[in-house]
Image (cartoon, rainbow, N blue to C red):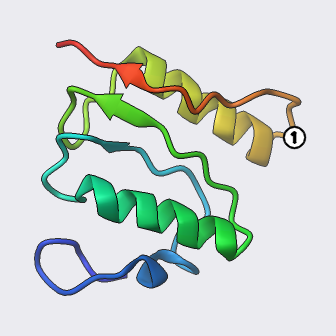
Amino acid sequence: MRVAGSQSFTPDDVVGSVDGAIEVEVADRTVPYDQAKRIDATLKKAGVPSYFVTVEGAGHGNFGRAADDRVEAFFGKYLLGKDVEISTKTIEWKP
């Protein structure tokens, strides 16, 4: 996969390279929000489990506990086979 910001990079570059969770924040300067939405759609179209969660007020990284809980649920579901729901409701992040 090519690195965003240093080279041209499309959502199709992600398919086949990603088999886990991706979180993107609205204020993320590394992966623009609209590009993250396209990545989510491309993953779903390819049959890759994807849950798009908007994290308002955060940059790249430092997602907060609520986002971490969603990642844990994702891995629990897809790696451990747990019967859990994964929320895609927007997270309001405050430092």
Query: Image quadrant of residue 69?
Result: top right
Instruction: Please say if 22 is above or below 57.
Output: below
Q: In which quarter of the image is the N terminus?
A: bottom left
Q: Name the residue at 52% across, 60% down.
A: 40
Residue that numbered label 1 is attached to: 81
Q: Position of residue 14 (x, y in %)?
A: 46, 76
Query: Image quadrant of residue 44?
Result: bottom right
Q: Position of residue 82 (x, y in %)?
A: 85, 32
Residue 72 appears left or right of 37: right
Instruction: Please say if 41 is above or below 25.
Output: below
Amino acid type assigned to the residue bearing label 1 in the image: Gly
Q: Quadrant of the C terminus?
A: top left
Q: Position of residue 73 (x, y in %)?
A: 67, 30
Residue 4 appears left or right of 1: left
Q: Position of residue 46 (x, y in %)?
A: 68, 76
Q: Name the residue at 17% across, 40% down.
A: 27
Instruction: Please say if 82 is above or below 6.
Output: above
Q: Name the residue at 35% across, 81% down.
A: 10
Query: Image quadrant of residue 70?
Result: top right
Residue 34 appears left or right of 37: left
Q: Name the residue at 47% across, 83% down.
A: 12
Q: How many labels does the image show?
A: 1
- The secondary element bearing badge 1 is classed as loop
